[in-house]
Amino acid sequence: MAENEVIAKSPCLGDCNPNEDGICLSCFLSSKENDQWNHVGNQERLAMLENARQRQKAKSEGRLMTEIGTINRA
């Protein structure tokens, strides 16, 4: 890992509140992303965090969160 590489930290707040699409309204990870968090590398975690950030922004703008990222990852 590079010296200046950002380390992804879980956005989980311990207060799961999934909507009907499986997106937690507390941390904005999809249920699939949350399940995979401990099984993927830092780069994929950073991508998940970006998806979560974009979902949070979409929600605040009244847009659909399901259009962001891949919710049903294999």
Image (cartoon, helix red, strand yellow):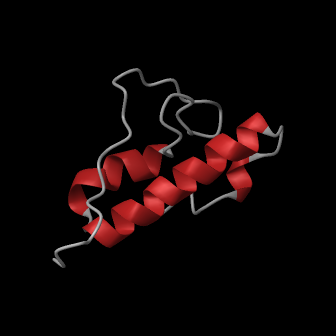
Quadrant of the image containing the C terminus: bottom left
| Residue 49 in picture, x, y percent from top left | 45, 54
Seen from the viewer's position, the closer of residues 70 and 9 is 9
- In which quadrant is the N terminus drawn? bottom left
Given residues 5 and 9, the one toward you in this image is 5
Residue 16 lies left or right of residue 38; in this view the side is right
**As drawn, 72 above or below 61:** below
Residue 50 coordinates in the image, percent (x, y): 52, 58
Q: Residue furthest front?
A: 4
- Which residue is found at the position 30% from the left and 56% from the top? 8
Identify whether 42 is placed above or below 58.
below
Q: Position of residue 34 (x, y in %)?
A: 38, 45
Whole-percent x and y of residue 30? 51, 46
In the image, what residue occupies the spot 16% across and 74% down? 3
Q: Quadrant of residue 42?
A: bottom left
> For the image shown, how many numbered marks are present on the structure?
0
Q: Nearer the viewer, residue 36 or 47?
A: 47
Given the current orientation, which residue lies at the most extreme bottom position?
2
Name above or below for residue 4 compared with residue 12: below
14 relative to 48 in the view: left or right: left
Q: Residue at x 33, y 24 (%)?
A: 14
Identify the image quadrant of residue 71.
bottom right
In the depicted view, which residue is nearer to us: 8 or 38? 8
> Which residue is found at the position 54% from the left and 49% from the top?
52
